[in-house]
Image (cartoon, rainbow, N blue to C red):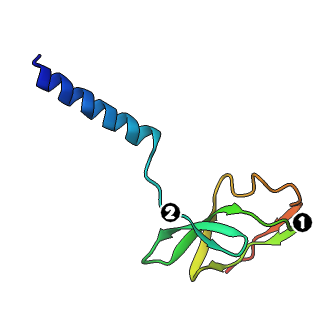
Amino acid sequence: MSGKIKRGLGLLLSLLLCAWLFPMTASAATAGDYEYYVIDETAKTAEIIQYTGNAADLEIPKTLGGYSVTSIGEEAFSRCDTLTSVTIRKA
């Protein structure tokens, strides 16, 4: 293989590795004690990705920033030491 081809393959593999290690994600928005990201701009839906407040009993809001909350991220409450209950109301 020529040097140019080897360098090209090396660059391609490096880019693929970076894409795998650092996937592009939507930027988070904040509303009150919540961080969220927009799932679907057209449908106006969002997912809570982090709760930063210190409530003991929490009721999930129906909307954040004009978007309907349709899901809660896996680690959304991972830093909540005071939280004892979470209520999700039907829309």
Res. 70 image quadrant: bottom right
Q: Quadrant location of the C terminus?
A: bottom right
Q: Where is residue 72 in the image (x, y as percent from the top left)?
A: 65, 62
Question: Mark 1 or 2 closer to N-term?
Answer: 2
Q: Quadrant location of the N terminus?
A: top left
Left of 3 or right of it: where is 68? right
Res. 65 image quadrant: bottom right
Tell us which disc is closer to us: 1 or 2. 2
Q: Where is residue 13 in the image (x, y as percent from the top left)?
A: 30, 30
Residue furthest top as drawn: 1
Q: Position of residue 68 (x, y in %)?
A: 59, 77
Q: Which residue is drawn at 73% across and 70% down?
A: 33
Q: Position of residue 89 (x, y in %)?
A: 75, 76
Is 77 placed above or below 61 here?
Answer: above
Q: Is mark 1 on a helix, strand or loop?
A: loop
Left of 12 or right of it: where is 75? right
Q: What element carries label 2?
A: loop
Residue furthest left as drawn: 2
* Cα gap from disc 1 to disc 2, whole angstroms: 28 Å
Is 4 placed above or below 17 here?
Answer: above
Mark 2 sits on what residue?
Answer: 27
1 and 2 marks in contact (CB < 8 Å):
no
Q: Residue at x 73, y 63 (%)?
A: 51
Left of 5 or right of it: where is 76? right
Q: Residue at x 81, y 56 (%)?
A: 80
The amino acid marked with disc number 2 is Ser
Mark 1 sits on what residue?
Answer: 56
The amino acid marked with disc number 1 is Ala
